[in-house]
Amino acid sequence: MYDTHQLLRFHEFLRESFPHVFNCSYIETEVINTYSLLFTVTGSTPELQPYLLMGHMDVVPADPTQWTHDPWAGLILPDTVTGEDYIWGRGAIDNKIGVMGIIMALNYLAKTDFQPTRSFYVAFGHDEEVRGADGAGHISQVLQERGVTLDFLLDEGTPVISGLMPGFTVPTALISVTEKGYMTLQLQVEGEGGHSSMPPQDPAVSRLVAALNNLALNPQPSLFGKGPEGDTFTYLATKASWPYKLFYSNLWLFTPLLEMVMSRSRESNALLRTTTSITIVRAGVKENVVPSSASAIINHRVHPAQSVEDVIQHDLAAINDPTVKLTVKQQMAAYPVSPYGPDVPGWRLLTSAIHHHFPGAVVAPAVMMANTDSLHYLNLTSCIYRHYPIHLTKKDIPGIHGSDERLSVTNLRQATRIYHRVMVWAGDAAGPPQHHQE
């Protein structure tokens, strides 16, 4: 569950900190289902199709004993090496950067009395970390009841990142155009129990271990090139150094080699295939009692090119033991792939805004490994983009849902500028400036 008292306190903080937003004639504020917020920004040309900017106010728990600084203190401290100021705290990246960046940009818009040309919505859900049904689910329902359709949607997602893959000296700005599906399976094995001094010949635990080992030895197949990840490399190839430019530009020839290399890294391996994680194993209650049953929970993140039925069939073939009972506890297919490219207005707007503030970065489509609140808006638009407009390194990534989550003040300013740029450019009849990549 979520802390409703703290959510209401956060509402008050927003109202006190950004009075121009809550007192602007062309911005309507609504509280949805008690704890979520919906802002309707009416543009000067309301017949233009609106879009939606999203964030979520809730965060995952944090264990203060595992942090260098108190995760709830909201400290701004200089880095001990660079001296750059960082905001420390749970949710600094996921997803207060979205919430604060958007509302700061919106506050500046209202403060300068600049009414945008195109109308848009801002949605802040309150329960994304527990699937978002009470927050984003209700906001989406409200918009659908009003007959709203969206040109595009921008939610949290993949960032501008350095050092992501070999061969790149420039930052890569990844915009996720789909999300992996989600599946939770339970493996259950029954067997003969009894005293440990006289163990059975074929105990349940041994069969479960064999099943888990078979899953580990037989991963789901590589589907590289059957989803957006192929275009990820095609887009990035323009800025790759030699000889990586040769590999990334000729995937028709080098795909087997690239698959082999990518399979060795947990981050890049997740791009190739449906991942398999053994997350919970249960058996036994006492050291001298042979358990008569054993179970395990398997979590899959499903590749966009694979159905949940194919995932199950692969697992059954890999386990190869009819006495292991497989039960689907939860499943969700991968999301549809949103259109992308220079001819897609929403994509062009976002890439232009990113290039304006990160002129050295190369933009590419990507697959989101985790899941977001955008699930609840699939009926409102086919153009859903997931991007953090901030520059991170690989060292920053473990802080998301981990210990010592922090974000530089520079990144907060940059995110605010990009959200503001989207708000201003979205209504330009001529479209934003085009940024071509070789």
Image (spheres, rainbow, N blue to C red):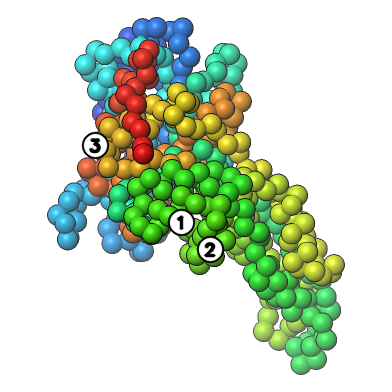
Residue type, numbered disc 2: Leu
> Can residue 10 be seen here?
no
**CB contact under 8 Å: marks 3 and 1:** no
Mark 3: which secondary structure?
Answer: helix
Residue toward you, 111 or 251: 251
For marks 3 and 1, give the CA distance: 36 Å
The residue labelled by disc 2 is: 257
In the rendered image, residue 133, in percent from the top left (x then y), is placed at 58, 35
Mark earlier in primary sequence (3, 1):
1
The residue labelled by disc 3 is: 413
Give the image quarter of residue 256: bottom right
Mark 2: which secondary structure?
Answer: helix
> In the drawing, what numbered circle is on residue 114?
none
Front of the two marks 3 and 1: 1
Query: As displayed, is residue 87 above or below residue 261?
Result: above
Count the marks. Answer: 3
In the rendered image, residue 119, in percent from the top left (x then y), is placed at 41, 14
Residue type, numbered disc 3: Arg
Q: Label 3: how many residues lie within 10 Å, few (<14), some (14-19) or many (20+)?
A: some
Q: Report whether 333 appears left or right of 159.
A: right
> Can residue 241 be seen here?
yes
For marks 3 and 2, give the CA distance: 41 Å
Residue type, numbered disc 1: Phe
